[in-house]
Amino acid sequence: MPEHSALLAVDVIGSGSSRPEHLGTIPDLVRDLTQAALHAVGIDGDRPEDDQFTGDGFLRAYPSRFLPALIDMISVLDALLAEHNRTTKPEIRLRVAVHLGPLPARRGFYRPNIDLSRLLEAAALKHVVDYCREHITGDTFTTALILSDNAYRTVFQGDYTRVIGRNEFAPLLITNNEFDDRSWVRVAGVHPTQISGIPPATAPSWDSTPLFSDSGMSIEGVDTAQSVNTSSHAGGRSNEVQAGTVHGNVSQSDQGKYVVTADHAQGVQIGDGNTQNVDFRRSPSE
């Protein structure tokens, strides 16, 4: 049996409606912003096992040990996108999918990659994105992260993440071609109960039947109605951000934050020192 891999897929929302002069810059912007976020959680220097360019995004496979960091990376990416979108055109907003599955070393057409694409391109996820942008976040929207049920259970049953918590996700049923399974969705700045209350795309205006089978409760008794901060940046955490590229060492402090050594970091600052997030602070040993 092949080793399990942590699979990451990123796609730009609405890239087709971008102005012609911006289209050529979008792939580089997505790559640079994502690479900065990956570096901030300590995996930038590790080459993916597989890397496929998709036009306005990419699909990558990493060793399974990087699954928690790939999820935590979204918090950094939210902050970088928020700063970029305040100051620079074109604005970038992303759908991101993360999955965990056995992937042979030889490149080919395998079930985990197919499932990853089904999650990223699911109509139900796109409806959540459209609804949140229109009714909740407006122009502050940055990312929608969808986890497969396998990735969600694996990472949160062991409480392996340092920044992103299980209570930031709402369950979402995905039916896309042959794929039919529960997934977990996080939208930066949107409370899980707001996501769970989104009406189906085909429902008439008087029908408030939600997209989700679990009304306010996730698997294993996790209460998605539990209070979480819902500011528009980095999934509800207050952040000060300067966009750019990070080069340097990353470690984890006793408080669970990712600490980027200040002497080796360039251009990206996340966090205010009081939140559980990524920040520029010297490690305790310095």
Image (cartoon, rainbow, N blue to C red):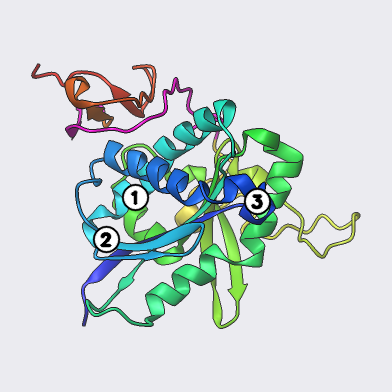
Q: Considering only vertical position in the picture, is 213 above or below 268?
A: below
Q: Is residue 247 left or right of residue 223?
A: left
Kind of residue indicated by mark 2: Tyr
Residue at the disc numbered 2 = 62
Q: Is there any visible trace of residue 108 in the rendered image?
A: yes
Q: Considering only vertical position in the picture, is 33 above or below 213?
A: above
Q: Is residue 253 magenta?
A: yes
Rendering coords of residue 275 (x, y %): 38, 22
The C terminus sits in image quarter? top left
The answer to whether mark 2 and mark 1 are in CB contact below 8 A is: yes
Q: Considering only vertical position in the picture, is 60 above or below 267?
A: below
Asked whether 254 or 225 is in front, the reply is 254
Which disc, if any, is residue 129?
3
The answer to whether mark 3 and mark 2 are in CB contact below 8 A is: no
Which disc, if any, is residue 128?
none
Query: Which residue is found at the position 38% from the left and 82% from the top?
Result: 109
Which disc, if any, is residue 70?
1
Query: Which residue is found at the position 41% from the left and 40% from the top?
Result: 33
Kind of residue indicated by mark 1: Leu
The answer to whether mark 1 and mark 3 are in CB contact below 8 A is: no
The N terminus sits in image quarter? bottom left
